Amino acid sequence: MDEVEKLLDTVYTGNERVTREEIRRHAVAAEAPANVVDAVDALPEGEYAYDEAGEALAQLRSGAGGGTSLTGGVPPEDLDDSDLSRELRHLHETRDETFRHGPPQALANHDARSAELEAEYLRRFPDRAVDPHRLRPGGSPG
């Protein structure tokens, strides 16, 4: 059984959702390998169900080994359009929590991952629809 699966089996015993910090506490206490602890540290702040944590950690660990992502996540160019949109949505949903309560490393990782994913989105969709109601007077959509 993989180290991540062992860790998650322990953490989620009797729990449906746990925080990133709880997962980290268990990883450190279990003396999990450094790459597992690093992947847990890279998770955005928040609560996770077992399957959400497992998927996120698998993506972080696989991206850290051979991808070009600076944050250890799946390189943005390797995500299909729906995964890219989902990742962006998740980052935007977790922004306030990370900003207010995350340690400096988590905030820096959140900033870097947001920049990576947003740059990839703009590369793929340079002509995205701009809502004219969001423009300031004198502003232009392009």
Image (cartoon, helix red, strand yellow):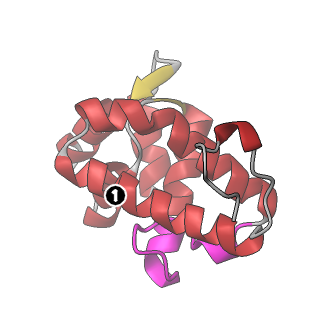
Dot 1: element: helix
Q: Quadrant of residue 134?
A: top right
Give me the residue at 78% from left, 66% from top.
Answer: 80
> In the drawing, does residue 123 fall left or right of residue 95?
right
- In the displayed orientation, state which residue is furthest to the front: 138
- Magenta stretch in the rendered image: 61-79
Give the camera-side residue of 30 and 119: 119
Give me the residue at 42% from left, 25% from top.
Answer: 18
> In the drawing, does residue 110 fall left or right of residue 79?
left
- Residue on which disc 1 sits: 109
**Amino acid of disc 1:** Asn
Residue 27 image point, x, y percent? 28, 45
Give me the residue at 61% from left, 53% from top.
Answer: 139
Give the camera-side residue of 9 and 133: 133
* Crowding near the residue tagged with mark 1, few <14, some 14–19, many ≥20 C-alpha atoms within 10 Å: many
Residue 7 image point, x, y percent? 39, 43
Residue 23 image point, x, y percent? 34, 37
- In the displayed orientation, state which residue is furthest to the top: 14
Residue 66 is a magenta residue: yes
87 to 23, vertically: above or below: below
Give me the residue at 74% from left, 70% from top.
Answer: 126
The reply to whether residue 32 is in sight is: no
Q: Quadrant of the C terminus?
A: bottom right
The reply to whether residue 109 is in sight is: yes
Residue 71 is a magenta residue: yes
Q: How many labels, in total?
A: 1
Residue 78 image point, x, y percent? 68, 75
